[in-house]
Amino acid sequence: MSEKPEETATLHQARRVDRIFKACATGAGILILLALAAVTLFLILRAFPAFTGDPDSRTQAILSLSGGRASSFLGYVGPLVFGTILIAGLALLLAFPVSLGIALFIGYYAPARLSTLLSTVIDLLAAVPSVIYGLWGALVLVPNITGFWRWLSVHLGWIPLFSGPVAAPARSVATVALVLAVMILPIITSVTRDILIQAPRLQQEAALALGATKWEMIRLAVLPFGRSGIISASMLGLGRALGETMAVLMILSPGLSYSLRLLQASKSQTIAANIAAQFPEADSQGVALLVATGLVLFIITFIVNYLARRITAKAGA
């Protein structure tokens, strides 16, 4: 039978829409690649003078930026990389279990009305600007958490992580990590919740029918399904913590050392906060050095995302 003119026109229109959508999707993908290439090229070109300029000028700029504590680029950027990874990793370590627990409570334990309310609150918290968390940390948390850090140092001071003297006010790595944990918690929770509630209903009902408790059902049917999504959510939160600037700048007393003393002041600094603090007063050579540290942060973020993709692919296999 020959197709009716109306059906033929509808088919041609559908194909045209598909071609337009494919072209838009392809263009968006190419645009992302071009933007990434442009950022990479910008960082390389602006950081180039930091490695090819006059050695004496470079050394003088590093001494000026580091307050005399480093004279080489590696000696300058090394502690910054260490501080960035330490603070971001500690924030993720604090936020992940809480985020997973909240996501499971919202999806499988909370009543419908409470679940809807909590989901709305979590989504709103995820949209709060980082400077607000920084203000909360600087004005509320720093003056009031010193006593708790002292108690922790008294009882767990035999562990190097918690040894004193405790910073007063508490502008230390531990306080910044706690603020960043609160900051990334809504992001991890929101994504994790959306993944976990999509677990196959038939598998959940089958586990319960076989006599599993609710926790056993979650452990056997829900968590394995959402493993790759949970990892992706964690890496998304880690990415924000790695690049956070204002909250760290407003709270942390900066230092330039390889130190795991979380409760002491002036021990560590992050790359992003250091750039924001040093950029206004840096000369041309100093700007090139700061951009070079930004390039290092860009590479770290790229590596973290690449590893996250590999881990997610293995978890989803």
Image (tube, helix red, strand yellow):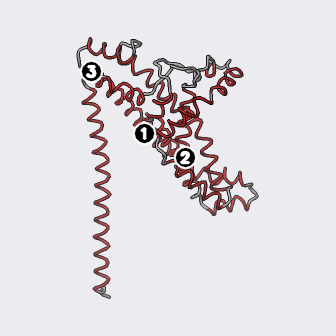
From the top left corner, tell me how far across and down residue 307 is, in percent: 46, 38
Point 48% across, 48% down: residue: 127
What residue sits right under mark 1 in the picture? 306
Q: Do the residues labelled 3 and 2 touch (CB within 8 Å)?
A: no
Question: Foreground residue, 226 or 253?
Answer: 253
Mark 2 or 1: in front is 2
Name which residue type carries label 1: Tyr
Q: Is residue 92 above or below residue 28?
A: above
Identified by mark 2, the residue type is: Pro
Viewer-nearest residue: 183 or 21 = 183
Mark 3 or mark 1: which comes first in sequence?
3
Determine whether the residue tagged by mark 2 lies in a helix, strand or loop.
helix
Image-based side of 279 in relation to 110, left or right: left
Residue shown at the point (51%, 39%) measured from the top left: 133
Give above or below for 113 relative to 16.
above
The residue that disc 2 covers is 186
Q: Which residue occupies the foreground of this view, 160 or 169?
A: 169
Q: Distance between the residues labelled 3 and 2?
A: 39 Å
- Residue at the spot x=41%, y=35% of the render? 301
In the shown orientation, is residue 234 left or right of residue 59?
right
Residue of label 3: 285
CA gap, disc 3 to disc 1? Answer: 32 Å
Image location of residue 165, percent across then percent down: 61, 16
Residue 55, horizontal then vertical, whole percent:
26, 13
Q: Which amino acid does label 3 sit on?
A: Gln
Q: Residues within 10 Å of mark 3 (few under 14, many from 20)?
A: many
Front label number (3 vs 1): 3
Q: Distance between the residues labelled 2 and 1?
A: 23 Å
SS of the residue under disc 3: helix
